[in-house]
Image: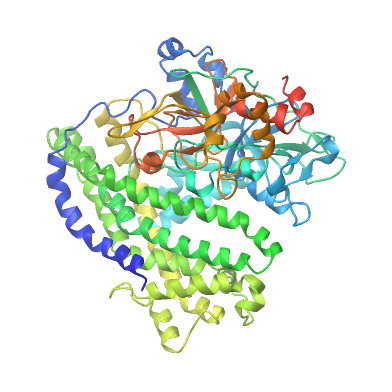
C-alpha cells in the first residue's frame, strides 16, 4: 500500500477519539444565535419577496423584489443551466456566456490536432460559422408548482416499511416529471429542507447549442491547477455559446435550418466595472451544499470520504496523463477528463484541509448539544422533537459503520466504464459477452486497469463486517482487472444489498429530516434557506478582500500587470504574445481588472453564474472559490467565504482589442 494511502487509512482510526472529544470541545465553543448573517444563503426565487429590501437598497440595489423575480420571470430568468454549470443570456439572440472550464468539454470535442481550438481559441465571424457543441444542453425555469402534498401522500400510502416509502416517493416523483405539461415544457421534481417541501420546476430545454467564442487555453485556464481554488487569480475563465431552435421557435436537435432562440429576458453587460464595497448578486444553479448535516456525517466525510476520493482521483489523473503520452490524438482526447478529475482532486484536498482547520465537526456537535438542552427545557418541544437528534445520529452512524464498503463498492462499479456497463446490463437481466479491457477500451485500457488495481488494494483489506463476499471469492479464484465481467458479476449481490440499505435509510430520513430542519429553524429564529440542489438560486454579496491568515491581507482585485508578473512563458503561466504586446505598447492597460472577490455564498454548479451589480447589469462571471472556502459547502464564514469572478472588463478588453469579436460586442450593445 502506498505510504500516502496508509496515512489516509490511519486518519479513519482517529475518528474514534475525535468523536469522543467532540462533546468536550463543544462545551468550550460559545453558541452563536446569530449564525445567519446578511450575505449567507443561496436563496430560492420564492424567498426574494421576504428580503429586507430597504437594507439592500441602502447597499446599492436599484431593483425591486418583483423585478428580481415575480413568479415566472424577472432578472433571474436570464440565468440558465448548461451541462451542470450556470450561464446567462446576454442578447436577444440567445448569446450565452459561461466559464471556459464549463465549455472546455465542447471546445475539446470539436478540436483536432490540426485545428486545435482548445489551444488557439475560437472566434466565429457569423452565425454560419458557429460550431455545434456535442452533448450540450441549455435549460431555464418557466415556473414552479408546490407538490409537497402529493409527495407526502405518496410516502404515507406505502405503509410502515421505510424502504417502501422511499420507493413510493421515487415513483411519484417520476410520475410528476413525466406528465404531459404542454409543448416545449419539461419538469424536475426536487425536495427542499430535507423533504419538508417539494417543488415541480417547469423548464424549457434547448438542445441545439453552438460554440461562438472561446479564448486560448492559456487565457481560459491561466494558472492551471497551480492556481485552481486559490487567490490571487488571473484567469480569463469565459466562453460564449448560442442556443438555437426550430424555425417555429420550438426546441429541436441540431439542424442547419434552426434559428437563434429569442429569450424572454437577457442581461445587459455593464460598460464599467465594480468597486470594493459594491453590492453584487450571484444568480445560478448551485449544485450541492450540506449545511445541515450532523457532526457524525461531517466527521465521516472528513476522515474517510474526501481523503479516499483524493487518492482515487489522483491515480486516475496519473493514469490518464500517461495514456495521453501515447499519441497527440490521445493526449487531446483525454484533456477534458483530466481537467474534471483534477478539479475534483483539489476540491477534495481543500475539503480535508478546511474541515479540519475550521473545526466543523466540533461546531456541529456544539449545535447538537444546544438543541438537546433547548428541547429538554420545554415540554412542548419535547412532544414534537424529543428523540429527533438521536434518530438522525443513529442513521448517520449506520452509514458510517459501512462507509468503507460502500465507497469501494461504488468505485468498483462506476470508476471503469467497462465494468459500469456490464453491471448495468447484468442487473437488467441481459446476457453479457466476456470482454477484455483492451477490447472494450483500446488505448485507454491502461487507465481502467491501473485504477481498478488500486481499488483492489483497498477492497482486499476491508475490515471484518464490511467484506464483499462474492468479490473476495472472485479474487481468491484469481480474479483480476483483465476479467471485468467476472468483477461485475461478483458485485451484484452486494450492490443489491446496498440498494436496499440505502432505500431504507432514505425512507427513514424522509421521516426525520423535515423535523430535523424545522427544529433547527425554530432554534435559530431567523430566515432559513435550503441546501443547494442544482436549482435556481440568488446570493447577495459585497466586493471585498479577506485575510486568510495572520499577517496576510488579500485585495479584492487582480490586474493585467499581475497576470504578466506571473508569466513563465510556459506551463500553467504562459501569457499569450498579443496580451504582452498590447501592454508593452500602452502600459495603462496593465491596470485592467482581471478578477475580483466577493463574499458570495456559492458552490459547485455556480461556475459560470452571472454576477450582476445593483442595477442588474452583468459585471462578472463566478468561476471559483478561495482555498479557505472549499469546505464552505458545510458552512458559510463571513471572514473566509469568498467567491472568485472574472471581471467583464477583462472579457470585453480581450474581445475588443486582443482577439476582436466586433459582431458579438455589437450584439451585446457594446
At horizontal 30% and vertical 59% (from top left) the residue drawn is 400
Up/down of 450 relative to 31, above or below: below
The image quadrant of residue 515 is top left
The image quadrant of residue 90 is top right
* Scheme of image coloration: rainbow
At horizontal 62% and vertical 66% (from top left) the residue drawn is 325
Number of labels in the image equals 0
Q: Give residue 404's position: percent from left, percent from top.
A: 35, 66
* Quarter of the image that includes the C terminus: top right
Instruction: Say whether residue 262 is left or right of residue 375.
Output: right
Q: Nearer the viewer, residue 490 or 639?
A: 639
Q: Nearer the viewer, residue 553 or 474?
A: 553
At horizontal 55% and vertical 53% (from top left) the residue drawn is 340
Up/down of 461 relative to 213, above or below: below
Residue situated furthest bottom in the rendering: 477
Q: Give residue 288's position: percent from left, percent from top.
A: 45, 43
* Residue 122 visible in this rendered orientation of the protein: yes
* Residue 419 visible in this rendered orientation of the protein: no
Q: Give residue 141's position: percent from left, percent from top.
A: 61, 33
Residue situated furthest front in the rendering: 584
Up/down of 68 relative to 82, above or below: above
Q: Give residue 183's position: percent from left, percent from top.
A: 73, 37
* Quarter of the image that includes the N terminus: bottom left
Instruction: Say whether residue 473 is left or right of residue 338.
Output: left
Amino acid at each position: 500500500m502506498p505510504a500516502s494511502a496508509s496515512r489516509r487509512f490511519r486518519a479513519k482510526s482517529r475518528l474514534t477519539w475525535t468523536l469522543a472529544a467532540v462533546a468536550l470541545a463543544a462545551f468550550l465553543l460559545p453558541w452563536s444565535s446569530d449564525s445567519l448573517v446578511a450575505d449567507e444563503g443561496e436563496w430560492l426565487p420564492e424567498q426574494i419577496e421576504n428580503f429586507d429590501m430597504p437594507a439592500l437598497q441602502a447597499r446599492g440595489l436599484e431593483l425591486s423584489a418583483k423585478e428580481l423575480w415575480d413568479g415566472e420571470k424577472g432578472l433571474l430568468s436570464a440565468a440558465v443551466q448548461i451541462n451542470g454549470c450556470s450561464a446567462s443570456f446576454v442578447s436577444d439572440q440567445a448569446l450565452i456566456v459561461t466559464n471556459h472550464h464549463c465549455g472546455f468539454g465542447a471546445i475539446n470535442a470539436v478540436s483536432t490536432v490540426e485545428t486545435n481550438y482548445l489551444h488557439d481559441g475560437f472566434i466565429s465571424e457569423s452565425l454560419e460559422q458557429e460550431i455545434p457543441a456535442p452533448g450540450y444542453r441549455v435549460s431555464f425555469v418557466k415556473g414552479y408548482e408546490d407538490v409537497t402534498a402529493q409527495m407526502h401522500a405518496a410516502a404515507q400510502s406505502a405503509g410502515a416499511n421505510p424502504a417502501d416509502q422511499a420507493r413510493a416517493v421515487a415513483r411519484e416523483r417520476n410520475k410528476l416529471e413525466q406528465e404531459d405539461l404542454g409543448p416545449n415544457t419539461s419538469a424536475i421534481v426536487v425536495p427542499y429542507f430535507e423533504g419538508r417541501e417539494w417543488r415541480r420546476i417547469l423548464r424549457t430545454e434547448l438542445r441545439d447549442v453552438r460554440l461562438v467564442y472561446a479564448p486560448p487555453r492559456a487565457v481560459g485556464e491561466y494558472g492551471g491547477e497551480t492556481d485552481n481554488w486559490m487567490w490571487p487569480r488571473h484567469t480569463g475563465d469565459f466562453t460564449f455559446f448560442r442556443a438555437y431552435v426550430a424555425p417555429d421557435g420550438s426546441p429541436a436537435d441540431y439542424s442547419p435550418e434552426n434559428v437563434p432562440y429569442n429569450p424572454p429576458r437577457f442581461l445587459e453587460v455593464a460598460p464599467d466595472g465594480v468597486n470594493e464595497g459594491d453590492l453584487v448578486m450571484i444568480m445560478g444553479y448551485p449544485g450541492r451544499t450540506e449545511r445541515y448535516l450532523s457532526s457524525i456525517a461531517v466527521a465521516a466525510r472528513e476522515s474517510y470520504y474526501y481523503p479516499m476520493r483524493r487518492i482515487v482521483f489522483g491515480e486516475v489523473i496519473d493514469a490518464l496523463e500517461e495514456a495521453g503520452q501515447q499519441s497527440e490524438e490521445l493526449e487531446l482526447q483525454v484533456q477534458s477528463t483530466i481537467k474534471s478529475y483534477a478539479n475534483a482532486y483539489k476540491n477534495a484536498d481543500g475539503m480535508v484541509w478546511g474541515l479540519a482547520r475550521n473545526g466543523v465537526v466540533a461546531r456541529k456537535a456544539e449545535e447538537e448539544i444546544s438543541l438537546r438542552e433547548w428541547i429538554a427545557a420545554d415540554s412542548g418541544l419535547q412532544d414534537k422533537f424529543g428523540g429527533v437528534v438521536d434518530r438522525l445520529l443513529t442513521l448517520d452512524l449506520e452509514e458510517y459503520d459501512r462507509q468503507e464498503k460502500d465507497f469501494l463498492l461504488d468505485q468498483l462499479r462506476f470508476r471503469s466504464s467497462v465494468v459500469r456497463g456490464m453491471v448495468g446490463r447484468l442487473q437488467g437481466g441481459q446476457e453479457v459477452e466476456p470482454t477484455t479491457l483492451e477490447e472494450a477500451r483500446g488505448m485507454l485500457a491502461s487507465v481502467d486497469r491501473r485504477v481498478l488495481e488500486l481499488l483492489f488494494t483497498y477492497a482486499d483489506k476491508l475490515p471484518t463486517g464490511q467484506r464483499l463476499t462474492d468479490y473476495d471469492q472472485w479474487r481468491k479464484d484469481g480474479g483480476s482487472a483483465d476479467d471485468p465481467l467476472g468483477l461485475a458479476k461478483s458485485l451484484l449481490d452486494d450492490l443489491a444489498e446496498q440498494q436496499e440499505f440505502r432505500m431504507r435509510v432514505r425512507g427513514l430520513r424522509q421521516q426525520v429530516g423535515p423535523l430535523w430542519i424545522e427544529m433547527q429553524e425554530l432554534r435559530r429564529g431567523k430566515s432559513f434557506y435550503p441546501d443547494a440542489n442544482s436549482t435556481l438560486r440568488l446570493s447577495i454579496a459585497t466586493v471585498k478582500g479577506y485575510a486568510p491568515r495572520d499577517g496576510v491581507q488579500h485585495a479584492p482585485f487582480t490586474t493585467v500587470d499581475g497576470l504578466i508578473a506571473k508569466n513563465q512563458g510556459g506551463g500553467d503561466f504562459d501569457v499569450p504574445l498579443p496580451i504582452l504586446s498590447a501592454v508593452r505598447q500602452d502600459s495603462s492597460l496593465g491596470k485592467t481588472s482581471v478578477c475580483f472577490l466577493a463574499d458570495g455564498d456559492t458552490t459547485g454548479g455556480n461556475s459560470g453564474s452571472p454576477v450582476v451589480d445593483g442595477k442588474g447589469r452583468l459585471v462578472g462571471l463566478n468561476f471559483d472559490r478561495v482555498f479557505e472556502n472549499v469546505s464552505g459547502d458545510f458552512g458559510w464564514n463571513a471572514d473566509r467565504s469568498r467567491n472568485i469572478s472574472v471581471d467583464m472588463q477583462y472579457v470585453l478588453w480581450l474581445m475588443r482589442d486582443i482577439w476582436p469579436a466586433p459582431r458579438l460586442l455589437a450584439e451585446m450593445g457594446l
